[in-house]
Amino acid sequence: MAAELWLLRHGATEWARNGRHTGRTDLPLLAEGEAEAAALAPALSAVAFDAVLVSPLQRARRTAELAGLGAGAQISADLMEWDYGDYEGITTAAIRSQQPAWSLWRDGCPGGEQAQQVQRRCERLIEQALALAPAGRVALVAHGHILRALAGTWLGLGAPGGALLSLATATVSVLGFEREQRVILRWNNRLG
């Protein structure tokens, strides 16, 4: 078997439901988000993971726990969500009322991260995951934009390639190989 990276986005939070950029603010899951995360557990219990990496933020850690992946999970600061800086807690519509052509993927965030910085984190995550399980499965439990950037980086498009991928809360996506080519094996799936 070739390596597979299983990307799990955390369950719903208040700001995710409202479209507010939730980077480093450590919000809990809503009751709905807890139910979404728990619904992943039955299908994930049938999958053997060689390692589990999780963002240090509580919404990701709780999702891992409810999905049955909490035991033995390793915290990875590289899985933190994009640092939105001055745009933390603000919607894209509000940002665009001041900066009409703004794109996170192209412009980054004042006082926060740029795509190149996020891409370096993604490159480290991929290297770490492949070292942990060169022929196995690694679960990465984190946040929407960092996981999208990770997929873009995996595909050779860089972090901005994540702009091409939509990712709902409490979904599972799988990155892997077709022969030696890095591919998306599954994207934005609800398992529960």
Image (cartoon, rainbow, N blue to C red):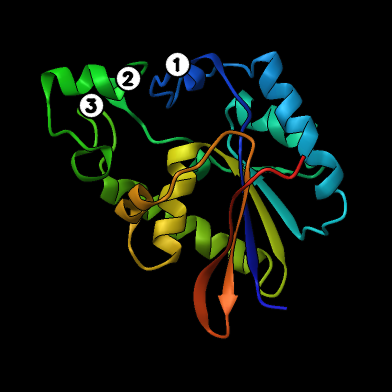
Residue drawn at (67%, 23%) of the image: 33
Question: Element type at marker 2?
Answer: loop
Tell me: residue 177, above or below residue 18: below
Q: Which residue is mark 2?
A: 91
Task: Give the camera-side residue of 58 and 192.
Answer: 192
Amino acid type indicated by mark 1: Asn
Question: Element type at marker 1?
Answer: helix
Asked if the residue at tag 2 contacts the one at tag 1, i.e. Cβ–Cβ closer than 8 Å, the answer is yes
Q: Quadrant of residue 23?
A: top left
The CA span between labels 1 and 2 is 8 Å
Task: Give the camera-side residue of 109 and 178.
Answer: 178
Residue drawn at (34%, 20%) of the image: 88
Residue drawn at (29%, 37%) of the image: 113
Residue 98: x %, y % from top left: 12, 19
Sort mark 3 into few (<14), some (14-19) or many (20+) by Cα contacts within 10 Å. Answer: few
Residue with the most extreme bottom position: 179
Query: Which of pointers 3 and 1 lies earlier in the amino acid sequence?
Result: 1
Amino acid type indicated by mark 3: Gly
The CA span between labels 3 and 1 is 22 Å
Residue 39: x %, y % from top left: 79, 34
User: Disc number at residue 111?
Assistant: 3
Question: Element type at marker 3?
Answer: loop
Query: Which of pointers 1 and 2 lies earlier in the amino acid sequence?
Result: 1
Q: Which residue is mark 1?
A: 18
Q: Quadrant of residue 95?
A: top left
